[in-house]
Image: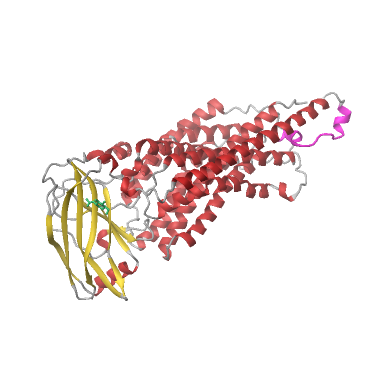
Amino acid sequence: MWLVLEILIVCCLCSVMTDEHTHIYDDNEEVVLWMNTVGPYHNRQETYAYDSLPFCFGSKERISHYHETLSEALQGVELQFSGLDIEFKVDVPKSEYCGVQLNEEHYKTFVYAIKNHYWYQMYIDDLPIWGIVGEVTDSKYYIWTHKKFEIGYNGKQIVDVNITSENKVPLTPTTKLSFTYEVIWKKSNVKFEDRFDKYLDPNFFQHRIHWFSIFNSFMMVIFLVGLVSMILMRTLRKDYARYSKDEDIDDMERDLGDEYGWKQVHGDVFRPASHPLLFSALIGAGHQITTVVFCVIVFAILGELYTERGSLLSTSIFVYAATSPINGYFGGSLYARMGGKLWIRQMLASAFMMPALVCGTAFCINFIAIYYHASRAIPFSIMVAVTCICLFVILPLTLVGTVLGRNLAGQPDYPCRINAVPRPIPEKKWFMEPGVIILLGGILPFASIFIEMYFIFTSFWAYKIYYVYGFMLLVFLILVVVTVCVTIVCTYFLLNAEDYRWQWTSFLAAGSTSGYVYLYSIYYFFFKTKMYGLFQTAFYFGYMALFSAALGIMCGTVGYFGTSIFVRKIYSTVKID
Ligand SMILES: *[C@@H]1O[C@H](CO)[C@@H](O)[C@H](O)[C@H]1NC(C)=O
């Protein structure tokens, strides 16, 4: 019970805990320099602990505060006290803080790091600083040994930190390296609220390109919505006219088979999808993911989450756990309407689908990370904490949602009766086959998001901070509208071909967007990144697969949700004979 409580508290405090610093310093007060991680410049997601390189720490032992949250651990943040003596507004002249006598092994490690363009990352008062380990000139290896910190202050607050690496020393297996540092305090006019602005890169997130792509997608939306409503209104009106005329014709003539098109399948269209358990679990999880994405984007806009380490991830975990009832409600009610009896199994599948996907991927990558001693390896205690959140928060909340969903919305109240015997599906042209429709369905939604995908990928895999969440929200909304429109059109064609298997088809047609995103990520890997080696490749493709899967479930659910409303609507006007 204690453990549960503790985890709940940790979970709730994740976003609050980082506020433990007031960010206000008195003169001569200790300023802590945290060493975070080292890693290759070309992949910022591959990180190792700072002391995995034979660096040394200063002699100062005392640590006045230390914090590490769940999400920091998940993101591979590994703060270590540097031991450097830095005090607020006290300049330090160039002085040695430690020395290392290199041996053969140290030498090889440094050479490897320099060859791979390793950078180390530090934090001062939550402001990140990056320094380069060394450089290669004419196949000789040099290491930077002097760190010059220039810290800007405004009143009692730190608003700007620069580091300059100086004093290049050639590396040999027997050198004695002495590491030095220097601190210069400068008055600065930067406001505390704006101190993260210099990390944002407006040139990269060119607003013009962004607006242009949004404008394009928006045009597409208008075009699609217009197309959908026009086609459907005209066709449906024609269909209705034909069907209502039919009513005057006597039964004889009707039995001769004058009818064709979507009305023919009214006795099968509400037949439960095949694999109802899996289907409703996917739909439940999809509703939850959609809600989480929407909430996190809104929180990010309101809260400028990028200024706190790991706060985006903590927010996501928290929102995910809190929205579990949505998963249970939609999954459980759909399963009940499909006449499913194994509701406990369905609930477990719904609740653990995403956690299992995430943990499964993380687990595999963890193995490789442990082998490479990367700081990405998730500590055992964190795994226990995540398992506890799943078991004691997500599961009960999903149960509540499922029970509510089964009781409130579990009655099949379809407008048409389901025939006892399934109707055979007639032969149709190749492009009306569900497989083809599924493949085509994802193209337009992908086209509406791929420019944003480029920005998101680049900020995740390179040193860019993503901060244009307003655009992201717009793109999200556009994606939802485009997906719904495209899926409705696909389903209409499918039903007109008298194929009633629309549930899976609409889900997969919308979900195939993620297939295109994954293909794009493969292109991105080869042409836009400079990653190599097993660890980076596995890490990249593993997490991209996870991202695509989540996106696919989300789009699929959005598509299915829109389509099911549409299908209800058109069949509710059909008179059942
Ligand atoms: C840090 O570097 C930037 C750009 O070179 C400069 O504008 C700023 O004044 C520097 N800050 C400090 C505290 O030296």
> Residue 569's x, y, as percent?
66, 29
Of residues 258 and 416, the one nearer the viewer is: 258
Q: Residue furthest top?
A: 248
Against 10, residue 32 (above or below) is below
Which of the 4 image quarters holds residue 308?
top left
Colour theme:
secondary structure
Q: From where the camera sits, is residue 289 visible?
A: yes
Against 542, residue 385 (above or below) is above
The secondary structure making up most of the magenta span is: helix
> Residue 489's x, y, as percent?
66, 39
Tell me the quarter of the image containing the C terminus.
Answer: top right
Which of the 4 image quarters holds residue 238?
top right
> Residue 574's x, y, as percent?
73, 27
> Residue 398's x, y, as percent?
46, 35
- Judge from the rendering whether residue 471 lies leftward or rightward of residue 102; answer left or right: right
The part of the chain drawn in magenta is: 251-268
Does the magenta segment cover residue 356? no
Q: Residue furthest right?
A: 252
Tell me the quarter of the image containing the N terminus.
Answer: top left
- Judge from the rendering whether residue 526 lies leftward or rightward of residue 433; answer left or right: left
Q: From where the camera sits, is residue 109 visible?
A: no
Against 393, residue 572 (above or below) is above
Of residues 56 and 164, the one nearer the viewer is: 164
Of residues 280 and 317, the one nearer the viewer is: 317
Q: Residue at x 48, y 40 (%)?
A: 289
Which of the 4 image quarters holds residue 387?
top left
Q: Residue at x 62, y 31 (%)?
A: 565
Of residues 386 and 13, the one nearer the viewer is: 13
